[in-house]
Amino acid sequence: MIGRILTLAGGLAGAVGLSQFPEFSQQYLQRLAGQVDALTQVEADFDRSAERAGLTRAAALDELGTAGFSGQHAGDLRATFARAEGLRNDLAMLRLAGVYERLVMPHRMADAELLRATWADYAPAVPVTAAGLACAGIGFVAGWGVIGAALSLLMRPFRRRSAV
């Protein structure tokens, strides 16, 4: 009896948790787009400055050097440009994907800064969309299965062996 209650609780926890995914992923996508826009502006400003100096982006970064403040700034810019490229790729893939496809794309929603910011502003809500309800169903089945399997493994040593 306790096992059934725990598996039901696991199913409900999974349903409640996963039902929030469509809205959370939408809010993450909006923040991601904003971050890509901001980083694209930083890139464009740097590239214009480099062009006015008659340099390519790579040459301008090299000219900043590797020592002192200029070197640290060049390293920061390289990291920013690399992050911008990665976020642009994630945004393109997430925009093409539907809610259900995003469920299997957690690697495209893995930017720690964006996750923290999205989570900080996120307020759970009752899912009233078809996607929210479907995710709740998937979460229920997953939660039920995980808790049921874990309890089954934990209780295995305590089961009676049937006589043959």
Image (spheres, rainbow, N blue to C red):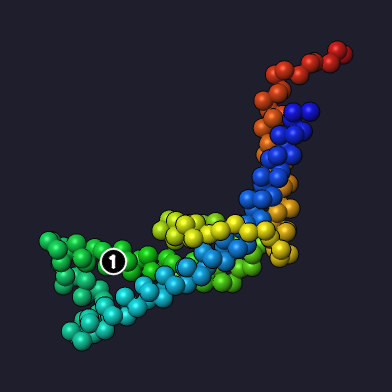
Q: Residue at x 51, y 64 (%)?
A: 28
The C terminus appears in which quarter of the rendering?
top right
Q: Report the residue that reaches farthest toward the left.
A: 68
Q: Residue at x 14, y 63 (%)?
A: 69
Of residues 127 and 45, which is closer to you in this image?
A: 127
Q: Report the residue that reaches farthest toward the right.
A: 164
Left or right of 96 on screen, residue 111:
left
- Can residue 146 be seen here? The reply is yes
Left or right of 91 on screen, residue 3:
right
Q: Residue at x 71, y 45 (%)?
A: 12
Image coordinates for residue 109, horizontal then vertical, percent = 51, 60
Of residues 28 and 120, which is closer to you in this image?
A: 120
Q: Residue at x 22, y 82 (%)?
A: 49
The N terminus appears in which quarter of the rendering?
top right
Residue at the disc numbered 1: 78
Q: Is residue 64 above or below residue 56?
A: above
- Can residue 149 be seen here? The reply is no
Q: Quadrant of residue 64?
A: bottom left
Q: Amino acid at mark 1?
A: Arg
Q: Is residue 47 above or below residue 90?
A: below
Image coordinates for residue 159, horizontal then vertical, percent = 76, 19
Image coordinates for residue 25, horizontal then vertical, percent = 57, 62
Counting every numbered tag in the picture gives 1
Q: Residues within 10 Å of mark 1 (few under 14, many from 20)?
A: some
Image coordinates for residue 161, horizontal then vertical, percent = 80, 15
Left or right of 160 on screen, residue 40:
left
- Considering the numbered disc 1 on the image, is that residue within a helix, a strand or a loop? helix
Of residues 24 and 96, which is closer to you in this image?
A: 24
Q: Is residue 4 above or below residue 76?
A: above
